[in-house]
Amino acid sequence: MPKIDTALSQMLGIDYPIIMAPMFLVSNAKMVIEACNAGIAGSVPALNYRTDADFRKALDEIKAGTDKPFGINIITNKSNIRMREQLDTCKEYKVGFIITSLGSPETVINECKPLGIKVFADVVDLAYAQKVEALGADAVIAVNNEAGGHAGDLSPEQIIPLLAKNLKIPVISAGGVGDRKSMQRMFDLGACGVSVGSPFIATTEAPVSHEYKQAIVDYTDKDIVRTTKLSGTPCTVINTPYVKEVGLEQNWFEKLLSGNKTIKKYVKMLTFYKGMKMLEKAAFSATYQTMWCAGQSISYVHSIKPVKEIVADLVRE
C-alpha cells in the first residue's frame, strides 16, 4: 500500500498516520509489535501490567520484536499511584511517545520532551486542548463521541475543526474509524491522524476471550450505550442482555454516596475498582455478566483477523 504522509506519520516516522489505541485489558506486547511492523504505531496502557517487572518484561518483548516507535498510555491523575514509577520506566526505555489521560500532562511533558519522547494528550474540548498546547504537548488526541471507553461529548464534525482552527499543534482523532473512508472523513475535517481501538479487539493476537471478540463481530454501533456502572463516569459498552438487566445508571444509594463530599473520593475509587474487576472477568472468561467495553467502530468488524489485516483494511484505497 502507498504511504500516507501527514504530520503524524512524519512525527513518528511511520507509513500510515494511525495509532492502535491503548485499550485497558486488551492491548498487549504482541499486538503492539504486529501493529508497528504493519506500518502504524502500536500502544499499550501502562496499567495493563500489575507490576513494574511485568511492564519492563513487556517493553523488552516489544523492543525485541520491532525497531519502530510505539507508545505507552499513562493515567496522569492522583488515582494512578504508580504514575511516577511508570513514567520513570518509560523514560529509561525511551519509548516513542506517551499518551496522557484523565489528568494534567505537565510532568510528563517536562520530563519527556528533553529526551525526545513525544507527548500526546487526550482532550475532549477546546479549553483543555489549549491548556495542554500551552504546556508543550506535541499533539492532542481529540476524543469524540464515537470513541470507545470514556468517550467525549462532541461529534467529530464539532471537535476536529474546532481544535484544528484554534491550535498550532497537530490534532489526532479518536473514535469512529474502521476503514479508509471513515479515516478520510477525519482527515477532511482537519485531523492529521487517527487513533483506532475497537476493531483491534477482534484480532487473533488480542488476549481476550473468544466471546468478547465475537461480540465485536456480532454487534453494531446501534448496540453501543453509555453506563456509569463501571467508573462513576459515562463509559461505552455493548448493550448485552446483562447490561440491559442491570441498567446503565448507578442506583440511588450509589448516587447518594457519590454525592457525599466527605467520602465521594473513596466511593469513586471503590466504584472504579469494582468496575474494572467486572470488565476483567468479562474480558477473559465466559460469563453471563458481560460488560464489554467497545466503541461505535465495531460496525466495521465482520470477522476475527490478525492485526496486520485490520491495518490493511484501514489503508486500502
Image (cartoon, rainbow, N blue to C red):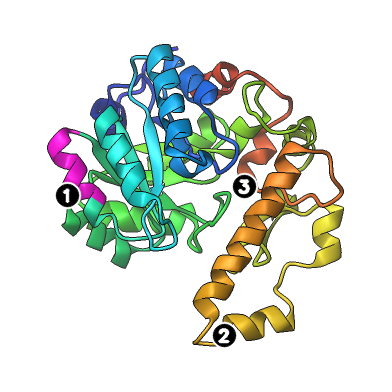
Residue 171 seen: no
Q: Earlier in the sequence, mark 1 or mark 2?
A: 1
Which residue type carries mark 1?
Asn
Q: Residue at x 56, y 71 (%)?
A: 268
Judge depth for marks 1 and 3 and give the one in front.
1
What number is the disc on residue 165?
none
Q: Earlier in the sequence, mark 2 or mark 3?
A: 2
**SS for tag 3?**
loop
Which residue type carries mark 2?
Gly
Name the residue at the left extreme: 114
Residue 214, how many percent across, how many down? Answer: 78, 33
Q: Nearer the viewer, residue 27 or 160?
A: 27
What number is the disc on residue 295?
3
Categorize mark 3 by other alpha carbons within 10 Å: few (<14), some (14-19), many (20+). many
Categorize mark 1 by other alpha carbons within 10 Å: few (<14), some (14-19), many (20+). some
Q: Which residues are magenta?
A: 108-116
CA separation, marks 1 and 3?
A: 32 Å
Q: Quadrant of the N terminus?
A: top left
Q: Is residue 79 magenta?
A: no
What number is the disc on residue 110?
1
Q: Residue at x 71, y 41 (%)?
A: 283
161 lies left or right of 149: left
Residue 122, how many percent across, how many down? Answer: 38, 52
CA separation, marks 1 and 2?
A: 35 Å
Categorize mark 2 by other alpha carbons within 10 Å: few (<14), some (14-19), many (20+). some
Judge depth for marks 2 and 3 and give the one in front.
2
CA separation, marks 2 and 3?
A: 28 Å
- Name the quadrant containing residue 205: top right
- Name the quadrant containing residue 256: bottom right
What number is the disc on residue 259?
2
Q: Earlier in the sequence, mark 1 or mark 3?
A: 1
Which residue type carries mark 3?
Gly
